[in-house]
Amino acid sequence: MRTSLSSYKVLVIVLIVIIPISLVALIINLPTKTPYSPFNSGFNGYSGITELLNNLITYRLGDIPKGFKGSILLPLTRELGIHDYEVIKDLIDGGTHLIILDEYGYSNNLLKYLGINAVVVSDIVLDEVFKGFSRYYPLIKFSLNSKSLELITYKPTYIEVFDTTYSLIAITSNYSYADVNGDGYYSIGEVMRSYVVVCRRGLGNGSITIVTDLDILSNDLLSMNSVVIKELISSPTYLVIGYLNLSDVDYIKYLLTKLPVIKYRRDIISLTTSYTVITVLSYISYYVSFNGFGRRGLKPYILSSTYLLITSLYYAVVSNDLLLIIPSITNLVVCLVKSDLRSPSILTTLIYYSLINPDMIVYLIPLYLLTPYLVDFRIDTLVTNFLGPTSTNLIKYSLMMLTTSLISIYSLITTTLITSSVLINTLIHYIRLSNVRVELLEVPNEVLLKSNASILLTTYSKSLTYLVVVSNGFKEVFRINGYSLIKFSIPTQHLGSYSLITYLVVIDSLGISRRLLRPLNIKYVVIPVTLKYLDVIRSELFSRRDVKDLLSDVELSITELGSGLVGIGVEEVSRVVSGLVRYGLRGTPIELIVSLVGFSEGFEGLGRMGRVGEYVGVRYYVPGDELRYIHWSKSLSKTSLVVKEFSTSNTPEGSISGGGLEPIVITDLVAYDVKDFDNIVLTLLSTFLSIVRTNPEVKTSLVLIYGGLVLVMRGKALDILYRLYKALSNLMPKLIYEYSPIKSIISEDYIKYLVSNLGSIKYFSKLVNANKSFTKELIKYLVFNDLTPPKPYVIIHSDVFKVRYALVRYELSSYGYRDIGLSKLASYIALGGVR
């Protein structure tokens, strides 16, 4: 079955948005291996000092505002630019404390510019006695702010100081030496003495400190040097990274860190900000994924909220941070008060604790496993994979929440946990759905066109389950529990054989999983209502021999309105019809007319025009007599026009008493669509059947109209019904299948014509004039066939011709015809023409 992709639109959009954000988050959070990079979490990286400084990183000295009163850490692995000298001097004069980390002498020109009589020498200093892990880690002991401090270094170089104007001098022990030849060992000629590694000098309102080791800030030594570093710097402190040999990836990561990333830092402002950001992202993601908020029962949320509260309280006590319990208390209040916000509130709080304190994730795993039970369940009508609507929406939500990876990389863990929970629960419910049984109980062989036909199914399920029935655009959801009987509609819009592939999908009560059952192949035939009615007529009348013995001939006449073409009798009617068809008149109703003419063959007296009364002789022609009554043979013998004279003293056999009025049934076969045509023919048959049931011998006239073609049949109601029955029994399927409705597409040329002549066209007047012309021609032909006033009549037509036949009724009434209405026709005949 061709399934709709609309269900995946939101998921596709989410992925398009989330994938770039996740890539950005990965670039930010995944470490590099560049030495001294703030994004390197290895032993030689600066990620530790970056976190200690609360991410106060800048790329250039020029980015620091003038008058800055804190400290600046300036590690150098390349030369400073000349323009940086003036910037540094202005900062120091303004009160900045500058700490330069330089192992290679890149700051010597700056020192000279500032008037400091000292030089950084790039020879590595080793110490065999006062050392950390090995001789490569000399220990530096000094006093600062009345505190005895110890600094551990890694392969430091040293400073040659040429004056004593320094507020701080930190030196190695007397057993240290400069490894001049670089072999890593003491060699003859290498001087063993104390070397200056740190020195500080006041300048202007600030100071400058030189440290000849970049590794004192590295992750490897930071924990051992944190006390010394805190004494060397003041708050706040910037780390300037633009003078390190960083990679392009490090630079991109630096630019990305300038995005508004929120982190929790144990203060109410940080908590409020981070919790608000995560809450907004969570609620938006939930609303988009679940298409709004829904209501769920209180019990599971109270249990979950209590669990979150206990977990947060435990960690608040352990970490001495009581602020941690605020989100869980907020969540509990929301769950008690706002029932439609319970699900997003639980998920928000769960993800918040996972992001700000990864150690809590282990304790929150039980809630992650239960997430499919803590969201608003949804039931849809899709035929897709085994993921239910709730599971699909939850995965959409977790993917959208990857935006929080800009806050913490642990967002990837939360998404993984939610997705894993969805898959586990989906598999469990998928197995349970295998117990659901659905069997086909009843399928009709034949159904009527556009009727309310349906199929019956029997179902069984141990627990509450939703059954989705999908078939050829039909979609419906049923609740089943235990044994159930399901009834669903089938399409009957078109005639013919149907073979429907019906898909049955069962979804558990929470929408977690779905299972596609065995598809059903349903076959049936849609037939027109008229065919069924023809069976009724056959069984009631024409299957009986005594009824067939009553059949006799009918009189026929045909014309094309406005053309003057008239045919009377079978031969003439056949000739006219053949000519009209030959010259282009088409349409299935034409075949009906041809069939009606053909069924008249074989009866005596065919072709006579009916007269009211008996022929009694001739008389001389007077103005006003109709030409069709002229007796041509006698006129030739008398050398003067004479007309036939008829007696009106006797009532013709089969006519209605009371003036000899026979009812006229006018039927227009033009319809809007196949259903409309079926209704017209059905109404025509039912009308004549009602007449026959009242009085089968009553003389009746049928006027069939198709476009400008008009066929008149006159005879007993039983005879006309029989001919309709025989013709339609053979033709009805073909008539229905090949009928051309009057629906049409308006051409572009016609639209242009309407627009260009909008002011000059009076549409209603044109419509009235056209219908008046049709009405006059029709009345003229009725009179020609002796269907003269005040004969009663009824009209059967499509609703699209309401205007035309309203005008026809008005004109017929003005000539004296009597409209008795279809509903009163049978009673009119039963009462002998008395209304």
Image (tube, helix red, strand yellow):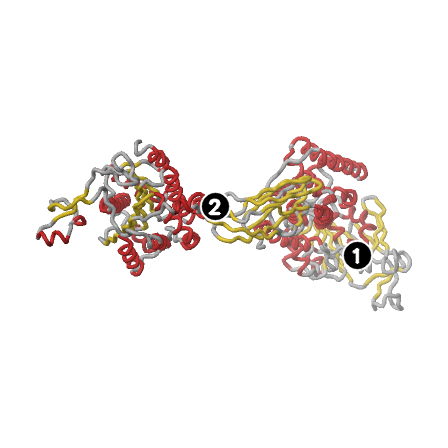
Please state the horizontal and vertical placement of residue 224, each as a whole percent of the image: 83, 50
Q: Taking 620 as reference, is 471 left or right?
A: right
**Res. 559 visible in picture:** no
Q: Taking 73 as reference, is 784 left or right?
A: left
Q: Taking 6 as reference, is 662 left or right?
A: left
Please state the horizontal and vertical placement of residue 358, each as a whole percent of the image: 76, 46
Residue type, numbered disc 2: Lys
Decide which of 577, 834 is in the foreground and name it. 834
Closer mark to the observer between disc 1 and disc 2: 2
Seen in the picture, residue 603 relative to 764 is either above or below; the reply is below
Residue pointed to by mark 2: 450
Residue 310 found in image quarter: top right
Q: Residue furthest left?
A: 639
Residue pointed to by mark 1: 43
N-terminal label among 1 and 2 = 1
Residue type, numbered disc 1: Phe
